[in-house]
Image: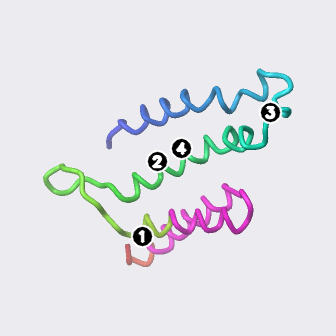
């Protein structure tokens, strides 16, 4: 098991934390233009989606080199995105749906 992704997650948290903490640190942030508020609100989910997509599609082959893998993981990511769009920003529900799909498919021995 590799811990490389733990460092990446910590780095992404450090990079996105200032924009997520901005409403706590800057009074009057609600007066910013709507596009700026939307941008700040979507930084965290955007980074999470990028990490999920890369980790679902790029794997190491038998020689240790990166290779493209289109399996149940990418279907789970797409399901998560679809649920989030359908349920209007319910990220937890989308994550649970994607993880549930992978659990069911792997338990059935299909993926």
**Would residue 68 appear left or right of 26 to someone viewing this image?**
left
Q: In the rendering, which numbered label is found on residue 109?
A: none
Of circles 4 and 1, which is in front? Answer: 4
Q: Give the camera-side residue of 89 and 64.
A: 89
Label 3: which secondary element: loop
Of circles 1 and 3, which is in front? Answer: 3
Q: Which residue is mark 3?
A: 32
Q: In the rendering, which numbered label is found on residue 72?
A: 1
Q: Which residue is mark 2?
A: 51
Q: Give the camera-side residue of 109 and 60.
A: 60
Per the model, the C-alpha gap separating discs 3 and 2 is 29 Å
**Would residue 46 appear left or right of 8 to someone viewing this image?**
right
Label 1: which secondary element: helix
Per the model, the C-alpha gap separating discs 4 and 2 is 6 Å
Asked if the residues shown at circle 4 and circle 2 are in contact, with their CB atoms under 8 angstroms apart, the answer is: yes
Residue 37: image quadrant is: top right
Per the model, the C-alpha gap separating discs 1 and 2 is 16 Å
Q: Which residue is mark 4?
A: 47
Please tell me which residue is depicted at 64% across the width and 26% down the height of the picture. Answer: 18
Asked if the residues shown at circle 1 and circle 3 are in contact, with their CB atoms under 8 angstroms apart, the answer is: no
- The image shows residue 31 at horizontal and vertical percentages of 85, 32
**Would residue 44 appear left or right of 70 to someone viewing this image?**
right
Per the model, the C-alpha gap separating discs 4 and 3 is 22 Å
**Mark found first going from the N terminus, 1 or 2:** 2
Per the model, the C-alpha gap separating discs 1 and 3 is 41 Å
**Mark found first going from the N terminus, 1 or 3:** 3
Magenta-highlighted residues: 77-106
**Mark found first going from the N terminus, 4 or 3:** 3
- The image shows residue 74 at horizontal and vertical percentages of 44, 65
């Amino acid at each position: 098991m590799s811990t490389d992704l733990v460092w990446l997650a910590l780095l992404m948290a450090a990079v996105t934390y200032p924009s997520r903490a901005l409403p706590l640190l800057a009074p009057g942030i609600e007066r910013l233009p709507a596009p700026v508020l939307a941008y700040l609100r979507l930084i965290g989910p955007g980074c999470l989606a990028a990490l999920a997509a890369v980790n679902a599609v790029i794997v190491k082959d038998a020689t240790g080199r990166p290779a493209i893998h289109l399996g149940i993981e990418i279907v789970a990511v797409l399901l998560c995105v679809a649920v989030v769009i359908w349920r209007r920003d319910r990220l937890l529900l989308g994550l649970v749906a994607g993880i549930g799909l992978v659990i069911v498919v792997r338990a059935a021995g299909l993926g």
